[in-house]
């Protein structure tokens, strides 16, 4: 479905960034840093923040320390808590947009519906959900992985006549106080919402398929003293370094030790015993404690932290049900043992479509051969180079693509992959190219190396068999993860050989277009007058080797 007959030979924008969450904001700053100014950031929401704009359920908060959940180029030192509430993180996103001069680059309330590569003119044509078309030389897909809610597949769910809502689409107009409420799911989102709901409902029933490993949360109010300390640059930098190391170790050290299975197993075993000891201090009922202990190894699913989650199940108005759900009825839920419970509201805390058909990205993308990207990944397996680019989809970069995420804070990933994309775009400019495409050989080398490393992790051991982990996709691979340290992820995205990409141009017109791309929308009317000078632009041969 590659387009070759578009009427416009020159794109309106040099770069189109799709998504105005932290990934899109980080991409905009990365483009600024390499001198790219003719870009647009679009988002289907009417507010920036992405995940933190969509997720507003009771108790939503960041699950890594606030002092490290901010960009290195704009640290924030005024947090209310060590683990800030979601609304505060969303406000930080607004602050970054304003301070980094991105407000004028935004077009909100405008989502992408389809992307087609115009092979004749080396540009992307993006159809928006408003029905118009945007054209850009390059596209950065900055749609996050926590974007599309996943509802449970349960018989009769459409028959339920009470209030049904997903945690990522919270209806604040609905008053659940004094109501009978059910929560389906016990992942990281449910862990935050359940204690808050329990405070105000008449009866709370939690349906658990698999338990979650939960460690204590070192949370506290960030008073003036702590925030003043973070105002000191060396302190802020030290906190960021130590915090990222600790979070990376807690969430991903077992993955990074894939080449040392004995060390990984010993580390995880120690963590399991510590968490079980913590659970004992919170819940003294042996039967309840048994239900809350996972039957899989620590790390098979993303672990979480909370000081109140376990205690909530000891409250008289809270029930934990581990019998599988059989079906919905008009008034409630029936479990496999035949017991029915009626509810006024059912909350689906069942997560997101992370790696699935049509989820990454959540709009069809047609490359040079007309093959839709989701179809290619479905048929050939999820794959990419450094989690950023895919052969046959030139001039397109993903901020969180297959095999990109080394578990930890997502901020280092965003900064690394957006720097990767900006680096390639800057090199294309330097070479006078209008098309940059990852070469097949380096792509395949990275893909097969990551596939082998991931397959060597404990995710595929018998200890994870019963975890129902979203780390493993429907194809049986852990394509959402990168089994390395975050340092390795950050370094390789910033220092890969630039000649791993192929840079090409098609005509003298395209040579002129290299500079014309840089003209901002406000200067479009003057571009025709500039064209004679653009035609004189001296282009460096696209296959000339370049330093890193």
Image (cartoon, rainbow, N blue to C red):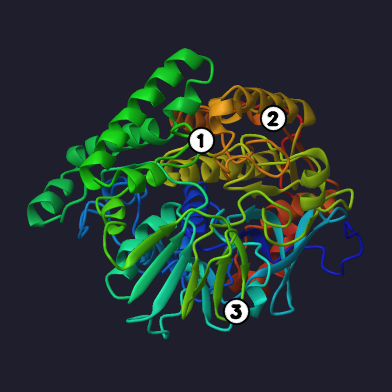
> Which residue is the extreme one toward the front?
338
> Which residue is the extreme one toward the left?
225
* Disc with the residue nearer the chain's start (2 vs 1): 1
Does residue 490 appear to the left or right of 145 in the view shown?
Answer: left
Closest to the observer, 502 or 2: 2
Closest to the observer, 287 or 204: 287
Q: CA distance from mark 3 to mark 2?
A: 44 Å
Q: Is residue 210 above or below residue 541?
A: below
Q: Is residue 197 above or below residue 261?
A: below
Q: Position of residue 56 (x, y in %)?
A: 41, 69
Q: Is residue 459 above or below residue 174?
A: above
Does residue 410 appear to the left or right of 390 in the view shown?
Answer: left
Say if residue 341 shows up in the picture.
yes
Q: Secondary structure at mark 1?
A: loop
Q: Are marks 2 and 1 in contact (CB under 8 Å)?
A: no
Q: Is residue 482 above or below residue 121?
A: above
Badge 2: residue crowd in 10 Å (few <14, some 14–19, many ≥20): many
Q: Secondary structure at mark 2?
A: helix
* Disc with the residue nearer the chain's start (3 vs 2): 3
Q: CA distance from mark 2 to mark 1?
A: 22 Å
Residue in view at x 54 percent, y 42 percent: 417
Q: Position of residue 291 (x, y in %)?
A: 41, 46
* Residue at image mark 1: 300
The quarter of the displayed image where residue 240 is located: top left
Residue in view at x 51 percent, y 63 percent: 20
Badge 1: residue crowd in 10 Å (few <14, some 14–19, many ≥20): many
Q: Position of residue 514 (x, y in %)?
A: 71, 51
* Residue at image mark 2: 447
Q: Quadrant of the C terminus?
A: top right
């Amino acid at each position: 479905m590659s387009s070759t007959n578009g009427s416009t030979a020159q794109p309106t924008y040099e770069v189109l960034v799709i998504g105005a969450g932290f990934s899109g904001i980080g991409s905009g700053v990365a483009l600024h840093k390499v001198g790219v100014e003719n870009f647009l950031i679009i988002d289907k929401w009417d507010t920036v923040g992405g995940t933190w704009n969509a997720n507003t359920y009771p108790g939503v908060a960041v699950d890594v320390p606030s002092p490290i959940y901010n960009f290195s180029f704009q640290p924030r030192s005024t947090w209310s808590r060590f683990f800030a509430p979601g609304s505060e993180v969303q406000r930080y996103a607004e602050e970054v947009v304003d301070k980094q001069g991105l407000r004028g680059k935004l077009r909100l309330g405008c989502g992408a519906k389809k992307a087609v590569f115009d092979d004749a003119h080396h540009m992307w044509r993006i159809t928006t959900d408003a029905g118009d078309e945007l054209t850009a030389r390059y596209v950065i897909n900055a749609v996050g992985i926590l974007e599309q809610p996943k509802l449970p597949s349960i018989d009769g769910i459409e028959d339920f006549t009470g209030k049904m809502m997903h945690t990522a689409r919270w209806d604040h107009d609905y008053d659940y106080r004094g109501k009978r409420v059910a929560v389906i799911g016990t992942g990281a989102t449910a862990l935050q919402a359940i204690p808050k709901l329990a405070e105000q409902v008449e009866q709370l029933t939690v349906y658990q398929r698999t338990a979650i490993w939960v460690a204590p949360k070192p949370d506290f109010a960030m008073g003036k003293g702590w925030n003043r300390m973070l105002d000191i640059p060396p302190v802020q930098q030290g906190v960021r370094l130590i915090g990222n190391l600790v979070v990376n170790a807690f969430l991903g050290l077992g993955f990074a030790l894939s080449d040392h299975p004995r060390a990984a197993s010993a580390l995880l075993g120690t963590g399991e015993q510590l968490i079980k000891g913590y659970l004992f201090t919170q819940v003294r009922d042996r039967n309840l404690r048994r239900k809350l202990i996972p039957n899989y190894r620590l790390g098979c699913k993303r672990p979480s932290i909370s000081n109140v989650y376990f205690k909530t199940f000891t409250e008289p108005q809270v029930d934990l049900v581990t019998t599988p759900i059989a079906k919905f009825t008009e008034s409630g839920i029936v479990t496999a043992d035949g017991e029915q419970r009626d509810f006024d509201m059912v909350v689906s805390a069942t997560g997101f479509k992370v790696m699935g058909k049509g989820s990454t990205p959540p709009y069809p993308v047609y490359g040079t051969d007309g093959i839709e990207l989701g179809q290619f990944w479905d048929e050939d397996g999820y794959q990419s180079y450094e989690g950023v680019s895919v052969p046959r989809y030139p001039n397109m970069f993903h901020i969180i693509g297959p095999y990109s995420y080394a578990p930890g804070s997502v901020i280092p990933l965003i900064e690394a992959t957006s720097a990767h994309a900006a680096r390639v775009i800057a090199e294309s400019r330097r070479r006078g190219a209008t098309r940059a495409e990852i070469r097949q050989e380096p792509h395949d080398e990275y893909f097969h190396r990551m596939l082998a490393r991931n397959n060597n992790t404990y995710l595929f051991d018998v200890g994870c068999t019963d975890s129902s982990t979203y780390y493993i996709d429907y194809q049986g691979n852990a394509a959402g993860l990168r089994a390395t340290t975050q340092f390795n992820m950050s370094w390789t995205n910033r220092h890969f050989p630039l000649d791993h990409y192929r840079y090409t141009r098609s005509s003298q017109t395209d040579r002129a277009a290299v500079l014309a791309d840089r003209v901002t929308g406000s200067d479009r009317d003057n571009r025709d007058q500039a064209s004679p000078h653009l035609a004189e632009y001296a282009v460096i041969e696209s296959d000339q080797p370049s330093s890193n």
